[in-house]
Image (cartoon, helix red, strand yellow):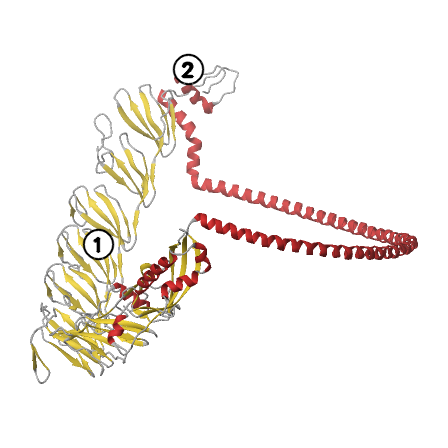
Amino acid sequence: MATRRANDEALYRIAPYHYLHVLDQNTNVTHLEIGPKTYIRQDNERVVLGPEKMITVPPRHYCVIENPVLLDKDGKVIKDTHGQATLQFADQDIRLAQAPFPLYPGEVLKQPVTPLKVVIANSALRLRAILDYEDSKEKRIAGDEWLFAGPGTYIPKKEVVVEETIRATVIKANQAIKLRARKECIDHQGIPRVTGEEWLVKKTGAYLPGAYEEVVDVVDAYVLTEKKALHMRALRTFDDDFGILRKSGEEWLIKMSDSEVHIPNVYEELVGVVNITTLTNRQYCVILDPVDDKGKPQMGRRKLVKGESSFFLMPGESLEKGIQNVYVLGEDEGLILRTTESFKEGVSEISHHPGDRWMIRGPIEYVPPVQVDVVAKRTAIPLDENEGIYVRNTKTGRVQAIIGKTYMLNQDDDLWHKELPPGVENLLAMDRDPIADRGTRGKGEAPIKGRDKTRVVTFRVPHNAAVQIYDYKADKARVVYGPELVMLMPDEQFTQLSLSGGKPKKPNQIRSLCLLLGPDFCTDIVIVETADHARLSLQLSYNWHFQVDLTSEKEAAKIFSVPDFVGDACKAIASRVRGAVAGVQFDDFHKNSAKIIRSSVFGFDENRKVRETFLFPQNNLVITSIDVQSVEPVDQRTREALQKSVQLAIEITTNSQEATARHEAERLEQEAKGRLERQRISDEAEAERSRKELLELQANSAAVESSGQAKAEAQSRAEALRIEGEAAVEQATLKAQAMKIEAESELERLTSARAAEAKFIREQNEMEIKKSREMSEIDASKFKNMVDAIGADTLKAIATAGPEMQVKLLQSLGLKSTLITDGSSPINLFNTAHGLVGGGLVPARRSADSDEE
């Protein structure tokens, strides 16, 4: 809106295509003044708007006017009795391209000049009627919706609003769009649709939805192959694309034989893609709940399918154990079968009842019927002479060991697991030589490898060792001597040995399955006390072996009669040693310790000589010798006294050795000093001779240096003067050449600069001439165009507008001819009327020396 002009202005010049709103304060009526004109405001009038430019609506544009004026049949504005333009309040008027028009008092430009909306091809405007009206085609009721399809230009109406722009959806090959009805309507094919109904449009091309249609989704077609099928489910009862009635919840397959391409209907959903199941001639499968020829599932039934075959699993079908390979049995293989229901097998029709078990052997190819379960596959177990397995008969419960032959378990046999005590398991798992691993036996190492408990337990008895095996079923024991391989029968167990070890001996330190027969040794520490109460710690080593009669089982069993023969032997020997040492003095024992200990253990024969061996009759253990490895006092004071005596003896020996070494060192030192003095005298004489030769050489060098220096200085001065002269000549030559080059370059530069300057001035003058010529042509063309645009009549009207208006003003005052002048100014008849009017209307602003405002 333009700003209002001040109310104190009385004269308004309204330009062409402009207008004013003038309020008559007496009648309170606002009227319109349209230019071109000069408007003289009366005292009872006020200009409430303007001058304002008229509204120009160019072609293909429109604007919206609110509260438009009411026109009669001839297009003229209807006014009331007071001269006020009659308005249609709360109404709108859409005005298209026309001559410039003003806004009457009360009219409002609701929407400025706006280009008309162009609807391109494959698009449309969804229109909605907000008022009842009747167009050229049909009658529209408020709320109706329809489409304005392109290409075209939409002409707006006041009764219609544009809801949205709809663009066509392009349906490609193997595609469809899913539509939903927003309201009851008739689709493009003339089919009535109810609200919320969905359907598919499969026609290839651009599809423009109707006014009451909305695009839900674009559905892509599924391409079917020979190896893929579609698993579909019906959401409601309907007829599918193949004309088959599908009930709600029904499931079916669509294969390539039905259609190469399938687009799911709106009432069916895709459950998944089913891949073809292919069986080779070496495969088979069992189908659960198979579908019959009518498509009905046979619940609870099973169907066997053998290869070669290819098929799709129907909805509801499943493979029991997947695709299985045909059992191909060799000569050393077999199958354990069990019947789940009664049936007759083969041509001979052998009857089998539920629960029957039997075995078939190869070579054969076997496919189990649906009434048969494969319990297990048996393979013949080849066994060497030193290998075996434990087999239990499931009917009788008898366990036997099969050794040294190839054996296949039948339908009534199972492999039996033989359990052994954990200690025995560890010893068997170590599989070590008890002689080589004497230092690590019985320390509870974890098993190195797991034992197959169905295999016959074997143990390699080393050389000169024995193992006792006890049969609990026969209540009988047997002893096996090495080297030998022991194989346990199902009811046999090893006798585990737990021996003393360490120093001094502690029980249960060594665990073993075999008993070493010796010869071997063991070491023990024994605390004894002499007659003078000196406590001593003796470290004794015993050599021992077993006297065994291999032909007598009773003698053989005696070696295992003492569980811990090491501990018992060491205790017996220690008790004899303690008794013998208790009766002698410390000094006697220290001098004759070996004799005392041997005699106490071995005893004396009839000739009062010490025996060679000591026999334990309970287990035939023989002690052959005793070695006293160390004798140490237990009492601290005794140990210290012995240490002092030993240290004193060592000190005396050390002092004597030190004196001898010191005398020898002094002798060697004197000899070295003599040799050093002679060497020093000879070195000084040699140094004097070298100094003499040095002085002679220095004198010769000084003479040569003085003569050479003078000659070199003279030669260098002459050479310097020669070089200096040559350099001065060359410098002068180069300086002359440089000055010549500089002068030539300066001349060339000045020549180029003058030529460039002249060329610049010439081109600048040409450009100025060209610019002046073009500006004059532009001005002439501009003036000519302005004159042509305004027109001769318009120019004439503009030139005569002022005088004519003044004449009309004088005529309105009733004056025929008037001239007012002060006598000193020239008479200006052209502005006379203007001065009269101005002087009459605004006397306060009139000048005494001028007849103009």
Q: Position of residue 771 (x, y in %)?
A: 58, 44
Q: Nearer the viewer, mark 1 or mark 2?
A: 1
Circle 2 sits on which residue?
A: 843
Q: Nearer the viewer, residue 517 or 755?
A: 517
Report the number of numbered marks.
2
Asked where in the image residue 265 lies, by quadrant, the reply is bottom left
**Residue sitting at 9 percent across and 62 percent down?**
247
Which residue type carries mark 1? Val
Up-down relation of residue 38 to residue 117 (above or below) = above
Q: Secondary structure at mark 1?
A: strand
- Up the image or down, 56 lies above or below 176; here it is above
Q: Could you say whether the residue bearing mark 2 is in a helix, strand or loop?
A: helix
The residue tagged 1 is 216
In the visual, does 802 lie left or right of 296? Answer: right
Reply above or below: 663 against 359.
above
Q: Which residue type does callout 2 highlight?
A: Pro
| Of residues 147 and 528, the one drawn nearer to the viewer in this rendering | 528
Contact flag, marks 1 and 2 (Cβ < 8 Å): no
